Image: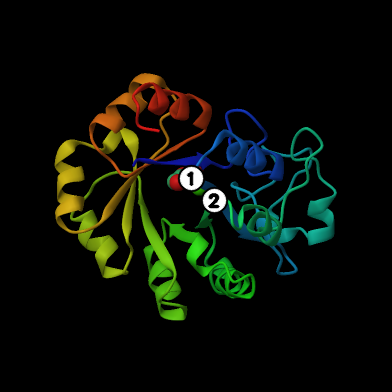
Amino acid sequence: MIEVTGHRGAAGLEPENTLRSIRKAIALGVDRVEIDVRVTRDGHLVVIHDETVNRTTNGHGYVKDLSFDELRRLDAGKGERIPTLEEALKLTKGKVTLQIELKVPEATEPTIRLVEKEKAEREVIITSFMHDLLRKVHDLNPVLRTGALFFDVQGDICQKALDVKSEAIHVYYRNVDSKLVDEAHKRKLKIAVWNPDEIEDMKRMINLNVDVIGTNRPDILLGLLKEMNMR
Ligand code: G3P
Ligand code: CA
């Protein structure tokens, strides 16, 4: 079965990376929810994509320069607050896999310790573009599954993922072709693609036989898979 990941929750339908967006993705029936994690000035793990709060909230400034209290006062859309990683974990636990993208190196160890505290080791996948962080995750706790993120396909990306003990390559969908899918499968890696939001692009990914499709519009993808009798 092709797994469906709600990107930043269901970011095409609700304010990205909010609990409301995560709830929406779960209600639609996704298998995974993807979120981004950063650290506040005073060391709290928070769910936000950009390095500043400018685009997604009514505030401004760098996440790393704001205290947790300052950041929590902001409106992240429709009255939502920027969630903590702990809130996201509690909301998804027992329902869907939480795909946690480490946006900064400082998030690595605290994220792993929190996942352990919540006993969610088997319900998360840790991803990053910074592949050395994935190696660190593996060293901290080898039970944890990781996925290496890539925008383009330069060099032997399967080997790069294997080198840091990842179970999957996560590649920008426009840069994925059947050669890459075959290569990943031959080397016992999963291939996840991010993030087609148009139906024609989703169909191409399904026909390529990828393992996981992330999207901001899980409603469209799940509907399509149902139509194709794949759900
Ligand atoms: O899942 C991969 C994707 O989330 C990476 O890109 O910029 O949306 O975090 P970005
Ligand atoms: Ca992300």
* Image quadrant assignment for residue 221: top left
User: For the point 39% across and 28% down, which residue is it?
Assistant: 225
User: For the point 57% across and 29% down, which residue is it?
Assistant: 12
In the depicted view, which residue is nearer to us: 160 or 21? 21
Query: Which residue carries the number 2 mark?
Result: 96
Asked whether, in this view, residue 176 is left or right of residue 47, the answer is left
Marks 2/1 in contact by CB < 8 Å: the verdict is: yes
* Image quadrant assignment for residue 42: bottom right
Residue 89 x %, y %: 63, 59
Query: Which residue carries the number 1 mark?
Result: 31
Query: How packed is label 2: few (under 14 Cα within 10 Å), some, or many (20 or more)?
Result: some
Residue 230 x %, y %: 35, 32
Which quarter of the figure is the N terminus placed in? top left
Query: Would you place residue 127 above or below residue 218 in this image?
Result: below
Q: Let me know if residue 179 appears in the view.
A: yes
Mark with earlier residue (2, 1):
1
- Mark 1 element type: loop
User: For the point 66% across and 32% down, which residue is it?
Assistant: 14
Amino acid at the residue labelled 2: Val
User: For the point 48% across and 45% down, which residue is it?
Assistant: 31
- Mark 2 element type: loop
Q: How far apart are the two marked residues, 2 and 1, measured between alpha carbons?
A: 5 Å
